[in-house]
Amino acid sequence: MDTSQFAGMPVEEGEPVFTAPWQAKTFAMAVQLNESGVFTWVEWADELSRHIAEFEKSSSIVDSDQYYTLWHDALESLVTRKC
């Protein structure tokens, strides 16, 4: 998997790192929704970037929990807007 498209994603040996099942599920939902045509990767990257930028105004991402919480929030926002 080419994770270069997921800036800031926790990776190890080129693969995503998940520390809890919900993180993997959130990742899988984003991939599946993209593959189903609900949104493009450009739309996804823009939405996730907005959420990360907003979060980083007051804090830094220090662990995968925070990172995937932002994935979840961005996914929820994008799906709500698109569906």
Image (cartoon, helix red, strand yellow):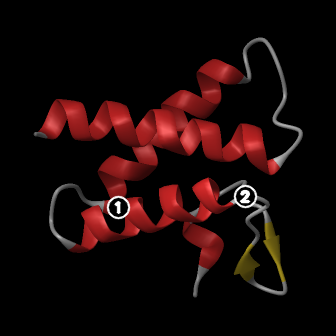
| Comes first in the chain, label 2 or label 1 | 2
In percent of the image, x 39 and y 59: which residue is there? 30
Alpha carbon distance from label 2 to label 1 = 24 Å
Q: In terms of image quadrants, where is residue 77?
A: top left
Q: Position of residue 44 (x, y in %)?
A: 37, 50
- Left-right relation of 37 to 29: left
- Please state which amino acid type lies under the numbered disc 2: Ala
Taking the view exactly as shown, the residue that stands out farthest to the right is 62
- Left-right relation of 73 to 56: left
Quadrant housing the C terminus: top left
Q: Which residue does the numbered mark 2 point to in the structure image?
A: 20
Q: Which residue does the numbered mark 1 point to in the structure image?
A: 41
Q: Regarding mark 2 in the picture, which secondary structure is present there?
A: loop
Callout 2: 10 Å neighbours few (<14), some, many (20+)? Answer: few
Total marks placed: 2
Q: Is residue 56 above or below residue 4?
A: above
Q: Is residue 53 above or below residue 3?
A: above
